[in-house]
Amino acid sequence: MKLNGAQILIQTLIEQGVSDVFGYPGGQVINIYDALYEYRDKINHVLTAHEQGAAHAADGYSRATGKVGVCIATSGPGATNLVTGIATAMLDSIPMVAITGNVPCSLIGKDSFQEIDITGVTLPITKHNYFVTDVNKLADTLREAFSLAKSGRPGPVLVDIPKDVQVASCEYERHAVVDKIPLPKVKQEYIERAAEMIKESQRPYVYIGGGAAGLGLGKEIVEFAGKIDGAIGCTFMGLSAVPQENERFLGMQGMHGHYASSMAQDEADLIIGLGVRFSDRATGNVAKFAKKSKIIQIDPDCAEINKNIRVDLGIVGDMRDAFKRIAMCCEKKSNPAWIARVNELKKQEEILEEEIAAASTVPLSPKQAFDIINELKPAKTVIATDVGQHQMWTAQYVKFDGPRRFASSGGLGTMGFGLGAAIGAYVATKDPVILITGDGSFGMNLNELATAVSYKIPLVIVLMNNGVLGMVRQWQTLFFGKRYSNTVLNRKTDFIALAKAFGAEGYRAETLVEFRRALTAALQDMKKGKTVLIDLRIDKDEMVLPMLPPGGAISDMITKV
Amino acid sequence: MEKSKFVIAVYVDNQAGVLTRVTGMFTRRGFNIDTVTGGETERSEYSRITIYMSGDDNVKEQMINQLRKLVVVKKVELLEEEAIKRELMLIKVKNDSVNRSEIMTAVDVFRASVIDYSPEGMCIEVTGNPSKIDAFVKLMEPFGILEMCRTGIVALDRGNITLFSKGK
């Protein structure tokens, strides 16, 4: 059938299995929005308050499901407003297709009204991007964009469509959903070498990253760790990949990681990395990282091998297949001394956590607040966060309800990510969503409260309000002689009144009893389709501990102040 | 780890913006490049980009792997150390009746050629591996170099090895 470019775009999105998109209209996407109107019974468009919110929503949508998230923005400022959202998705390898309109081809390069070279701008923060100049190539370009976004190491792809291409028409033929480009099967010799290294190891540490989190291998990983009698740790992005109640699971390692997890990694003689990239936040000082250990790294991305850390065995290819074959190839082992040591580390951690909680000032410590969240949160809850202290506490204390139940900006560390992502996660799953945020982060994109309320998104926002930019302030306390430059917010925002002004509910909590009451009420409101904010007051001097100072080694770990 | 100079050859899709995608990655990843050249190939759908750079084995490995990830890149290979490397230079040199014959001797010895001549400035074309070009520049310095322009290195492996036959 003959369609115009805008119709072809929407038809191709539908063809590729897209049921929801997030966006904001504008001059150079009017035709696209006209087509969205035409196909409104087949594709749901969520209008956000700001294009950045749309990009984060598409990202949260993807994190909660593994599907490709889609966002749409107009040319110029609309397109540049997507940038932080696209970069967030890039750094965390989240599949996303961003669609932008642009001025007609005849006006390109003339600094026309709302003209921006968005493919140039997003070159370093996309897997690939396209500027489509011919309507005949539009559908195939979009299909390629979807294929790229979800294949191999996933990531964002941008397609920029000038206005005249949206208007021009050509024949459109429906295609099937594009497949992922298959990753090469790992050669058997690598599998055997890995199995040999595992056999020789007496202190194995299975190290789970974001690349493994999406594969749904939690059960297999636990079985594998049992078979080789090893410990399991993870990166920030690998949280929620493995059932957390498992006794071998030590949690996140690294800068704000669990004591036992970081220590066990340091003492291991073999680290088996699954979809990890050895970021500076995970390794600290690379020269002193895992010095007693050999390293196996399995990843779909060849450039991750030996990028930050030299590994002893790099395995590139189909990670799921390679992992399963390695697990099969390994013999059952017993490492009683290692397990005893790991249990000892866990005991030390318990004592440490008690000390940290005891040092906390009344009326409530963050850990106590998270205990209540863990107790009250409904099954299958998606936890979204912003960035800062609240995010690290979430990583340390929340018991996640399985894979894809955690949406947080790890690599880019985007303050203002959470609210958009929470909206996206709800649209994708219709499951309960709790956003944990801070007063700094929330202030960045709180305009999306309007979106949450107008779409009746059942959402509980726990705003950990300490009146300061807590994480930067923590660094100032520890490393800058308490010179609190611009981290004391001194704002007079009444968050309850603010929530109500947007049409949401609001509760204030200053004690644990109040917080329990507020969260219980909020979860009831949420069931009725309401967006609720809890203004939870915490002390500004609370710190995230333990902490490895930036560039520090495991021996530099700060456990008390 | 020891640093060395090496050549990486890349086949890329012959389309607009490809060079930006490739060179943008160098800057982004902090690679230090000596020269980059690009041009048509025996296959009309591809261009060939030749990168001449230095670094240790880590840099070499990362460069190749990062190039492999670019969607427009179809094939990446490290060329052999003894690969044929050639660069072309146009160099405009001051000259007068006293030193002209000395310059002409150098042109002869380097198998260069004079391609434009006026009593005040002589334009010489030299081709060869980079060290030969460097040597010629040094030789011309005392006469006064008005302007010079180098293409950067192009290179092919020796024998019947081609980029597409490598790494298989």
Image (tube, coloured by chain):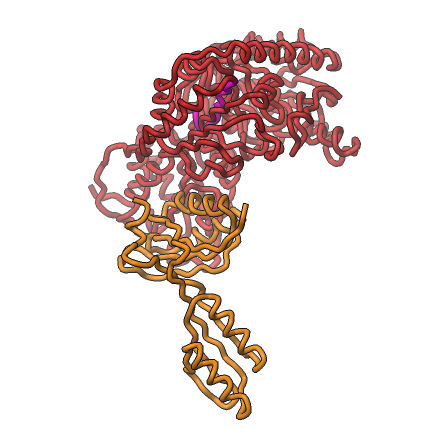
Direction bottom: furthest residue: B97
Residue A461 position within the rendered picture, expressed as x and y whole percent measured from the top left: 57, 20
Residue at (67, 21) in percent of width and height: A545
Chain that appears red: A
Q: Is residue A244 left or right of residue A190?
A: right
Foreground residue, A251 or A248? A248
Q: Is residue A207 a member of the stretch shown in magenta?
A: yes
Chain that appears orange: B
**Image height check: is A124 above or below A315?**
below
Q: Is residue B161 left or right of residue A194?
A: left
Direction left: furthest residue: A1
Residue A372 can be seen in this image: yes
**Image height check: is A269 above or below B5?**
above
Q: Quadrant of the C terminus of chain A?
A: top right
Foreground residue, A115 or A70? A70
Q: How many marks?
A: 0
Residue A448 position within the rendered picture, expressed as x and y whole percent measured from the top left: 53, 29
Which segment did they paint magenta? A203-212
Q: Is residue B126 a member of the stretch shown in magenta?
A: no
Residue at (39, 33) in percent of width and height: A316
